[in-house]
Image (cartoon, helix red, strand yellow):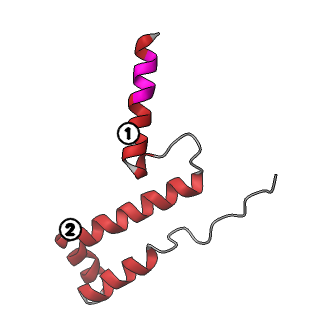
């Protein structure tokens, strides 16, 4: 029983330390937004990936980076309406 509590406390510590790991109340929309933003940040941070996207889209690297930054604002569209309780 003590091991189970220890595992849950470690999981809670990881979830509080790293935003992208989520928590028990994370919605599907929030999870997808985190995944999309992490992906765009990774694309911008890796020079070769940015080159690949710029060649594929036939755009300058600065334009591709700018487009990725714009997409990070609302990567999955506007948030869904929450039901009022």
Image x and y of residue 1, in percent: 47, 9
Tell me if label 2 and label 1 are in contact, CB under 8 Å.
no
Q: Is residue 24 above or below residue 47?
A: above
Residue placed at 31% from the left, 81% from the top?
65
56 vs 81, left or right, is left
Q: CA distance from mark 2 to mark 1?
A: 25 Å
Name the outermost residue toward the top.
Answer: 1
Q: Quadrant of residue 45?
A: bottom left
The 10 Å Cα crowd at callout 2, few under 14, some 14 to 19, many 20 or more, is few
Nearest the viewer among 5 and 40 is 5
Q: Main secondary structure of the magenta part?
A: helix
Dot 1: element = helix
Q: Quadrant of residue 54?
A: bottom left
Q: Is residue 81 above or below residue 6?
A: below
Image x and y of residue 16, in percent: 42, 44
Residue placed at 28% from the left, 77% from the top?
53
- Indicate yes or no whether the magenta region holds residue 37: no
Q: Identify residue for label 2.
A: 46
The 10 Å Cα crowd at callout 1, few under 14, some 14 to 19, many 20 or more, is some
Q: Is residue 7 above or below residue 80?
A: above
Range of residues picked out in magenta: 4-9
Choose the circle earlier in sequence order: 2 or 1. 1
Image x and y of residue 19, in percent: 42, 51
Dot 2: element = loop
Which label belongs to residue 14?
1
Q: Is residue 6 above or below residue 24?
A: above
* Mark in the foreground, 2 or 1: 1
Image x and y of residue 61, in percent: 24, 85
Residue placed at 41% from the left, 33% from the top?
11
18 vs 77, left or right, is left
Nearest the viewer among 56 and 85 is 85
């Amino acid at each position: 029983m003590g091991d189970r509590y220890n595992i849950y406390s470690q999981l809670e510590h990881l979830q509080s330390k790293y935003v992208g790991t989520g928590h028990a109340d994370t919605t599907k929309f929030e999870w997808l937004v985190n995944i999309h933003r992490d992906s765009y940040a990774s694309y911008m941070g890796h020079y070769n990936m940015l080159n690949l996207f710029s060649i594929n889209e036939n755009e300058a690297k600065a334009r591709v980076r700018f487009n990725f930054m714009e997409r990070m604002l609302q990567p999955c569209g506007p948030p869904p309406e929450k039901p009022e309780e």
